[in-house]
Image: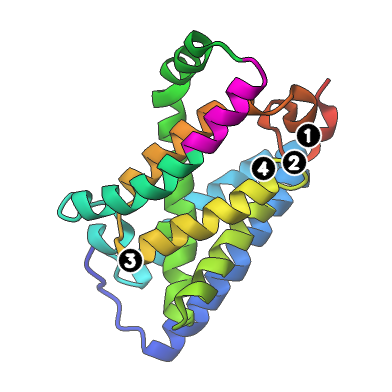
Amino acid sequence: MKNKFTLGPRVLHWLSIADVIGIPAIIVLFIWRWQFTHFEVWIVFPVWIIASFLLHGDTPKTLGWRADNLKRSAIEAGIFFGIAIAIVLALAFARGMPHHLVWSAVAEHLWAYFAFCLLQQVALNSFINNRAISLFRQPWLSSLVASVVFASAHWPNPVLVPITLIGGFAMAWIFRRNRNILTLALGQAIVGSLLALAFPPAWIHNLRVGPGYYRWK
């Protein structure tokens, strides 16, 4: 999308800071309170994000909606997610999960969950990570900022918080090298679909976060 605005670098710098701080704060407030008291606040998310894309002059390539680097991104993402999938499957089989249950669970929920993961990747990488990259030259620092934001949205789940912190860092790092959210969303969807089989229900509470984690029975 072509930027029709003529904002200077200093203004864009402060807008990036507002993005990195503002949207995560609203997300946390929405998860913990506003979804119950002011659900209509959800409209702030797409309006803010789209406005930010326009003001910063983002394009499909900078947002990670592209196919020209699909092979490179798939290789790097495949290495990380391949290791993650192997670990999750090992944990699932150690718990005595039959093979057919594992694959049927993935097949049943994969594509619906992929759409959800795609939205998460837009928020995590197309938005937060892109702004962090513009603020910090060090790859590890921008990736850390993105991963902390990602993990904070999964509080207080004791399984999801460390997994999203580590996974968020890796995905942000991969995105910085090869901007492509399609491969990242697919890998995230596969790993996420398998998590419920790898950990006891009493640990993950059906992968719920926020107040929902405490309300699970």
* Other residues around mark 1 within 10 Å, as few (<14) / some (14–19) / many (≥20): some
- Is tag 3's residue or tag 1's residue first in the polypeptide sequence? 3
Residue 90 falls within the magenta-colored stretch: yes
Label 2–label 1 contact, CB within 8 A: yes
Front position among marks 2 and 1: 2
What kind of colouring is applied to the model shown? rainbow
Q: How far apart are marks 3 and 1 (CA)?
A: 34 Å
Q: Is residue 100 visible?
A: yes
- The residue tagged 3 is 177
Front position among marks 3 and 1: 3
Q: What's the residue type where badge 3 is placed? A: Arg
- The residue tagged 4 is 160
Label 2–label 4 contact, CB within 8 A: yes
* Other residues around mark 3 within 10 Å, as few (<14) / some (14–19) / many (≥20): few
Q: What stretch is highlighted in magenta?
A: 85-96
Query: Of residues 131 and 155, which is closer to you in this image?
Result: 155
- The residue tagged 1 is 213
Query: Under tag 4, what secondary structure?
Result: helix
Give residue 168's position: percent from left, percent from top.
53, 55
Q: What's the residue type where badge 4 is placed? A: Leu
Query: Under tag 1, what secondary structure?
Result: helix
Q: How far apart are marks 2 and 4 (CA)?
A: 5 Å
Picture quadrant of residue 176: bottom left
- Is tag 2's residue or tag 3's residue first in the polypeptide sequence? 2
Q: Can residue 116 be seen in this view?
A: no
- The residue tagged 2 is 157
Give residue 17's position: percent from left, percent from top.
55, 77
